[in-house]
Image (spheres, grey):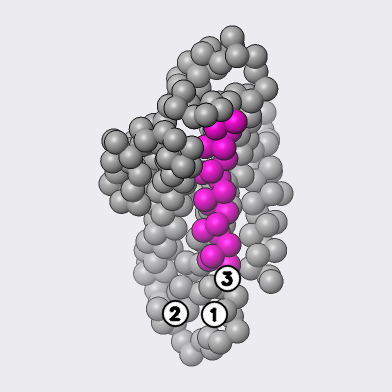
Amino acid sequence: MTYETYHIVIIVCSILAFVPALVFHEFMHGFAAYLLGDKTAASQGRLSLNPLKHLDPFGTVILPGLLILMGGPIFGYAKPVPYNPRNFKDPRKGDLIVGLAGPMGNFLLAAIAAIIYAVMGLFYTPSGIDFALIIYALYLPLLITTNLYLMFFNLLPIPPLDGSSIFALILPRKYLPKYYQIQRYALPIFLVVLFLVPYVLHIDIIGIYLQVTAGNLATLLMGL
């Protein structure tokens, strides 16, 4: 396999790991909301595993594409699945459950990929570069790490990330409308801070956090 071919294979495998991770993440938000009594996502056709239903032109296509061209890791986001906490029996607990459902969906995908990886490791004997080897040595590790990185990244308690849903549980009710307003418009500000802070402080705090959490857990899962 030439270097150019190998590079193309890496890009394809990265996309095929990244897109399902985003899609299942958003689907789990909508599914959790549906189970709690809110049908907003279902009524808008977002309770689906169809990637086109969740695609965000900038976050799912342009941003990851630019990062690939620059030789960086793939990063992006899908359209957030809509839900209405007022339809939950307990809006505060429901908001937290829906928020955590996305990262837990990523952990589920990572765990399934790790099981397949372990089974292949027991029964598969490489006899050259073939499709099975690409799945085992490249795609499954990428699928595991991508989902774990997405999981731990979203668990950060910073709006608009899923971890910030903890605020819905601990904030006094009178502050919740303001919190939801901040959460709605926090993404552009967060993205700017995310990319600027490492250059200003000369230290990638989030990168270190992800390596300690997602990176080590991925190594553990693939070593079982």
The residue at the point 67 percent across, 28 percent down is: 201
Examine the rendered structure and indicate whether residue 74 appears above or below residue 132.
above
> Circle 1 — which element?
helix
State the separation of the CA atoms marked 1 and 3. 9 Å
* Nearest to viewer (mark 2 / mark 1): 1
State the separation of the CA atoms marked 2 and 3. 15 Å
Name the residue carrying label 2: 132
Q: Residue furthest top?
A: 174
Pointer 2 with pointer 3, Cβ within 8 A: no
Pointer 1 with pointer 3, Cβ within 8 A: no
Q: Which amino acid does label 1 sit on?
A: Met
Pointer 2 with pointer 1, Cβ within 8 A: yes
What are the residue bounds of the magenta stretch?
A: 93-115
Where is residue 12 shown, x and y percent of the image? Answer: 37, 61
Q: What residue type is labelled 3?
A: Ile
The earlier-in-sequence mark between 2 and 1 is: 1
Number of the label disc, if any, that sits on residue 115: 3
Where is residue 105 shown, x and y percent of the image? Answer: 52, 50
The residue at the point 60 percent across, 31 percent down is: 93
For the stretch drawn in magenta, the main secondary structure is helix
* Nearest to viewer (mark 2 / mark 3): 3
Q: Residues within 10 Å of mark 2 (few under 14, many from 20)?
A: some
Q: Is residue 222 visible?
A: yes
Examine the rendered structure and indicate whether residue 174 appears above or below residue 222.
above
Q: Is residue 104 magenta?
A: yes
Number of the label disc, if any, that sits on residue 120: 1
Residue 66 location, quadrant: top left
The residue at the point 56 percent across, 15 percent down is: 176
> Circle 2 — which element?
helix
